[in-house]
Image (tube, rainbow, N blue to C red):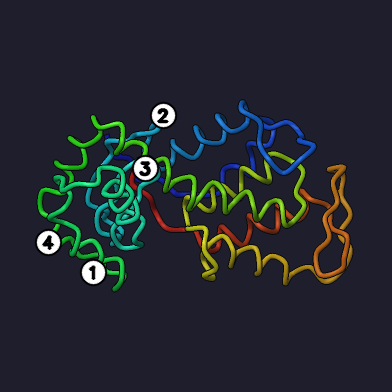
Amino acid sequence: MLLTVKRLPVLAIATFFFSSSANAWLNVCEVNLTYQLTNIFQTGSHLFQYDNCHVDTSGSGISSGIVNFNTRSGDTWDVISAYHDAKNEMNDFSIYGNALQEKAASKSGSISGLEGFCDVWKASVKDVLFRNAQDLVFNNLYVLPSQLEASKLGLQHSVSMAALYDTGVSLGAGEGSSSLGGIIKTTNKKVTKDIPGKSNSTIKVNGYSVDEIEWLNMFLEVRESKDSHDYLL
Protein backbone atom coordinates (compact mmCIF):
# COMPACT_ATOMS: atom_id res chain seq x y z
CA MET A 1 0.00 0.00 0.00
CA LEU A 2 1.32 3.44 -0.90
CA LEU A 3 1.18 6.06 1.80
CA THR A 4 1.90 9.75 1.40
CA VAL A 5 3.67 11.06 4.48
CA LYS A 6 5.48 14.19 5.47
CA ARG A 7 9.19 13.36 5.42
CA LEU A 8 10.60 15.02 8.53
CA PRO A 9 13.91 14.36 10.29
CA VAL A 10 12.44 11.87 12.74
CA LEU A 11 15.88 10.95 14.02
CA ALA A 12 15.63 14.14 16.07
CA ILE A 13 13.10 12.43 18.32
CA ALA A 14 14.70 8.99 18.24
CA THR A 15 17.72 9.77 20.39
CA PHE A 16 16.77 7.11 22.90
CA PHE A 17 17.44 4.38 20.33
CA PHE A 18 21.14 5.23 20.28
CA SER A 19 23.77 5.05 22.99
CA SER A 20 26.78 7.35 23.15
CA SER A 21 29.79 6.22 21.17
CA ALA A 22 33.44 6.86 21.93
CA ASN A 23 34.29 7.21 18.26
CA ALA A 24 32.72 8.45 15.04
CA TRP A 25 31.56 5.05 13.82
CA LEU A 26 28.38 3.21 14.69
CA ASN A 27 28.48 -0.25 16.26
CA VAL A 28 26.59 -3.16 14.72
CA CYS A 29 23.44 -2.70 16.78
CA GLU A 30 23.32 1.05 16.10
CA VAL A 31 23.93 0.50 12.39
CA ASN A 32 21.02 -1.93 12.17
CA LEU A 33 18.67 0.46 13.98
CA THR A 34 19.79 3.36 11.79
CA TYR A 35 19.27 1.39 8.59
CA GLN A 36 15.85 0.20 9.70
CA LEU A 37 14.60 3.69 10.57
CA THR A 38 15.76 5.11 7.25
CA ASN A 39 14.48 2.10 5.29
CA ILE A 40 10.97 2.62 6.65
CA PHE A 41 10.83 6.07 5.09
CA GLN A 42 12.58 5.04 1.89
CA THR A 43 10.58 1.92 1.01
CA GLY A 44 8.00 1.36 3.74
CA SER A 45 9.86 -1.64 5.18
CA HIS A 46 12.55 -1.90 7.83
CA LEU A 47 14.33 -4.41 5.58
CA PHE A 48 16.39 -3.52 2.51
CA GLN A 49 14.17 -3.95 -0.55
CA TYR A 50 16.54 -4.94 -3.34
CA ASP A 51 13.64 -5.54 -5.75
CA ASN A 52 11.97 -2.17 -5.08
CA CYS A 53 11.30 -0.38 -8.39
CA HIS A 54 8.69 2.20 -9.38
CA VAL A 55 8.14 5.45 -11.26
CA ASP A 56 8.90 8.31 -8.87
CA THR A 57 5.97 10.73 -8.82
CA SER A 58 8.20 13.53 -7.51
CA GLY A 59 9.98 13.76 -10.86
CA SER A 60 13.12 11.71 -10.21
CA GLY A 61 12.40 9.25 -13.01
CA ILE A 62 12.51 5.67 -11.79
CA SER A 63 13.42 4.97 -8.18
CA SER A 64 14.67 1.51 -7.27
CA GLY A 65 16.63 -0.66 -4.92
CA ILE A 66 17.61 -0.48 -1.31
CA VAL A 67 17.76 3.32 -0.94
CA ASN A 68 15.62 4.40 -3.89
CA PHE A 69 18.46 4.94 -6.32
CA ASN A 70 16.98 7.10 -9.06
CA THR A 71 17.62 7.66 -12.73
CA ARG A 72 17.63 11.46 -12.44
CA SER A 73 20.45 11.70 -9.91
CA GLY A 74 22.52 9.05 -11.65
CA ASP A 75 23.04 6.60 -8.81
CA THR A 76 20.89 4.08 -10.68
CA TRP A 77 23.46 4.18 -13.46
CA ASP A 78 26.20 3.74 -10.86
CA VAL A 79 24.52 0.52 -9.74
CA ILE A 80 24.06 -0.76 -13.27
CA SER A 81 27.62 0.17 -14.18
CA ALA A 82 28.95 -1.72 -11.14
CA TYR A 83 26.82 -4.69 -12.17
CA HIS A 84 28.16 -4.54 -15.73
CA ASP A 85 31.70 -4.57 -14.35
CA ALA A 86 30.95 -7.55 -12.12
CA LYS A 87 29.26 -9.53 -14.90
CA ASN A 88 31.85 -8.58 -17.51
CA GLU A 89 29.36 -9.49 -20.22
CA MET A 90 26.18 -8.29 -21.88
CA ASN A 91 23.14 -8.58 -19.63
CA ASP A 92 19.48 -7.56 -19.58
CA PHE A 93 20.36 -4.01 -18.46
CA SER A 94 22.66 -3.41 -21.43
CA ILE A 95 19.86 -1.98 -23.58
CA TYR A 96 19.30 0.78 -21.02
CA GLY A 97 22.90 1.95 -20.78
CA ASN A 98 22.67 4.95 -23.10
CA ALA A 99 19.33 6.12 -21.71
CA LEU A 100 20.53 5.87 -18.11
CA GLN A 101 23.70 7.81 -18.85
CA GLU A 102 21.73 10.50 -20.69
CA LYS A 103 19.24 10.88 -17.80
CA ALA A 104 22.08 11.17 -15.31
CA ALA A 105 24.06 13.68 -17.38
CA SER A 106 21.06 15.93 -18.01
CA LYS A 107 19.43 15.39 -14.58
CA SER A 108 16.28 14.39 -16.41
CA GLY A 109 13.31 12.78 -14.70
CA SER A 110 11.97 11.46 -17.99
CA ILE A 111 11.36 7.72 -18.19
CA SER A 112 11.44 7.65 -21.98
CA GLY A 113 13.67 4.83 -23.16
CA LEU A 114 13.32 2.98 -19.87
CA GLU A 115 10.26 0.93 -20.76
CA GLY A 116 10.36 -2.44 -19.00
CA PHE A 117 13.23 -1.33 -16.75
CA CYS A 118 11.49 -2.31 -13.51
CA ASP A 119 10.76 -5.80 -14.83
CA VAL A 120 14.45 -6.30 -15.51
CA TRP A 121 15.43 -4.81 -12.14
CA LYS A 122 13.12 -7.11 -10.19
CA ALA A 123 14.21 -10.19 -12.11
CA SER A 124 17.90 -9.36 -11.67
CA VAL A 125 17.65 -9.34 -7.89
CA LYS A 126 18.01 -13.14 -8.04
CA ASP A 127 21.64 -12.55 -9.05
CA VAL A 128 23.91 -12.05 -6.05
CA LEU A 129 26.19 -9.89 -8.21
CA PHE A 130 23.33 -7.45 -8.72
CA ARG A 131 22.57 -7.28 -5.02
CA ASN A 132 26.29 -6.76 -4.39
CA ALA A 133 26.32 -3.89 -6.90
CA GLN A 134 23.56 -2.17 -4.92
CA ASP A 135 25.49 -2.69 -1.68
CA LEU A 136 28.67 -1.28 -3.23
CA VAL A 137 27.08 1.94 -4.45
CA PHE A 138 25.09 2.32 -1.24
CA ASN A 139 28.29 2.09 0.79
CA ASN A 140 30.41 4.33 -1.46
CA LEU A 141 27.84 7.07 -2.06
CA TYR A 142 26.00 7.21 1.25
CA VAL A 143 27.48 5.29 4.17
CA LEU A 144 31.14 6.26 3.89
CA PRO A 145 30.60 9.95 2.96
CA SER A 146 28.15 10.54 5.80
CA GLN A 147 30.40 8.93 8.38
CA LEU A 148 33.46 10.76 7.10
CA GLU A 149 31.56 14.02 7.57
CA ALA A 150 30.72 12.93 11.11
CA SER A 151 34.38 12.17 11.75
CA LYS A 152 35.54 15.53 10.38
CA LEU A 153 33.10 17.31 12.65
CA GLY A 154 34.27 15.30 15.63
CA LEU A 155 30.81 13.95 16.42
CA GLN A 156 30.71 11.42 19.23
CA HIS A 157 27.04 10.52 19.67
CA SER A 158 25.56 7.80 17.52
CA VAL A 159 22.32 9.74 17.01
CA SER A 160 24.34 12.50 15.29
CA MET A 161 26.05 10.04 12.97
CA ALA A 162 22.73 8.37 12.22
CA ALA A 163 21.18 11.73 11.37
CA LEU A 164 23.98 12.48 8.90
CA TYR A 165 23.56 9.06 7.28
CA ASP A 166 19.79 9.48 6.98
CA THR A 167 20.25 12.93 5.45
CA GLY A 168 22.78 11.61 2.95
CA VAL A 169 20.42 8.85 1.83
CA SER A 170 17.33 11.08 1.70
CA LEU A 171 18.83 14.24 0.17
CA GLY A 172 22.17 13.13 -1.25
CA ALA A 173 25.63 13.15 0.28
CA GLY A 174 27.09 15.78 -2.05
CA GLU A 175 27.96 19.45 -1.57
CA GLY A 176 24.82 21.02 -3.04
CA SER A 177 22.87 23.41 -0.85
CA SER A 178 20.13 20.82 -0.27
CA SER A 179 22.51 17.89 0.17
CA LEU A 180 24.37 16.70 3.25
CA GLY A 181 27.50 18.78 2.67
CA GLY A 182 25.54 21.93 1.95
CA ILE A 183 23.30 21.47 4.98
CA ILE A 184 26.37 21.08 7.19
CA LYS A 185 27.87 24.27 5.75
CA THR A 186 24.64 26.20 6.31
CA THR A 187 24.45 24.90 9.87
CA ASN A 188 28.03 25.87 10.62
CA LYS A 189 27.47 29.40 9.33
CA LYS A 190 24.91 29.83 12.09
CA VAL A 191 27.56 29.27 14.76
CA THR A 192 28.82 32.69 15.84
CA LYS A 193 29.49 32.05 19.51
CA ASP A 194 30.10 29.28 22.02
CA ILE A 195 26.97 27.15 22.50
CA PRO A 196 26.92 25.17 25.75
CA GLY A 197 24.80 22.10 26.38
CA LYS A 198 24.44 18.89 28.36
CA SER A 199 25.46 16.17 25.88
CA ASN A 200 28.97 15.66 27.31
CA SER A 201 30.37 16.16 23.82
CA THR A 202 31.72 19.43 22.46
CA ILE A 203 32.78 20.06 18.86
CA LYS A 204 34.71 22.95 17.37
CA VAL A 205 32.93 25.03 14.71
CA ASN A 206 34.40 28.29 13.39
CA GLY A 207 36.68 28.36 16.40
CA TYR A 208 33.78 28.15 18.86
CA SER A 209 32.92 25.37 21.28
CA VAL A 210 29.51 23.92 20.51
CA ASP A 211 27.61 21.23 22.36
CA GLU A 212 27.09 18.36 19.92
CA ILE A 213 23.36 17.90 20.45
CA GLU A 214 22.80 21.66 20.23
CA TRP A 215 24.62 21.54 16.88
CA LEU A 216 22.52 18.55 15.83
CA ASN A 217 19.30 20.41 16.59
CA MET A 218 20.51 23.28 14.38
CA PHE A 219 21.44 20.81 11.64
CA LEU A 220 18.01 19.18 11.73
CA GLU A 221 16.28 22.56 11.52
CA VAL A 222 18.25 23.36 8.37
CA ARG A 223 17.53 19.92 7.00
CA GLU A 224 13.81 20.29 7.60
CA SER A 225 13.80 23.43 5.48
CA LYS A 226 15.26 21.36 2.61
CA ASP A 227 13.18 18.27 3.22
CA SER A 228 9.56 19.39 3.42
CA HIS A 229 8.13 17.64 0.37
CA ASP A 230 6.09 14.43 0.41
CA TYR A 231 7.56 10.97 -0.08
CA LEU A 232 5.71 7.94 -1.36
CA LEU A 233 6.40 4.86 0.71
Residue 184 location in percent, x, y? 65, 63
Mark 1 — residue? 102
Q: Nearer the viewer, mark 2 or mark 1?
A: 1
Q: Are marks 1 and 4 in contact (CB under 8 Å)?
A: yes
Q: Label 4: how many residues lie within 10 Å, few (<14), some (14-19) or many (20+)?
A: some
Kind of residue at badge 2: Leu
Q: Kindly identify which numbered label has been placed on residue 113.
A: 4
Report how far apart the C-alphas of labels 3 and 1 lie in the structure: 20 Å
- Classed neighbour count for the residue bearing mark 1: other residues with Cα under 10 Å, few (<14), some (14–19), many (≥20): some
Residue 166 in the image: state x and y as whole percent: 54, 47
Residue situated furthest front in the rendering: 88
**Which residue has dot 3 on it?**
134
| Residue name at image x 87 percent, y 49 percent | 197
Which amino acid type is marked by label 1? Glu
In the rendered structure, which amino acid carries the disc numbered 3? Answer: Gln
The residue lying at 49 percent from left, 40 percent from top is 38
Relative horizontal placement of residue 148, taking residue 131 as reference (left or right): right
Label 2 SS? loop
Judge depth for marks 2 and 3 and give the one in front.
3
What type is the residue that disc 4 sits on?
Gly
Q: Name the residue that disc number 2 marks.
A: 47
Q: Quadrant of residue 70?
A: bottom left
Q: CA distance from mark 4 to mark 3?
A: 22 Å
Residue in the image at 68% along x and 46% along y: 160
Q: Is residue 114 left or right of residue 206?
A: left
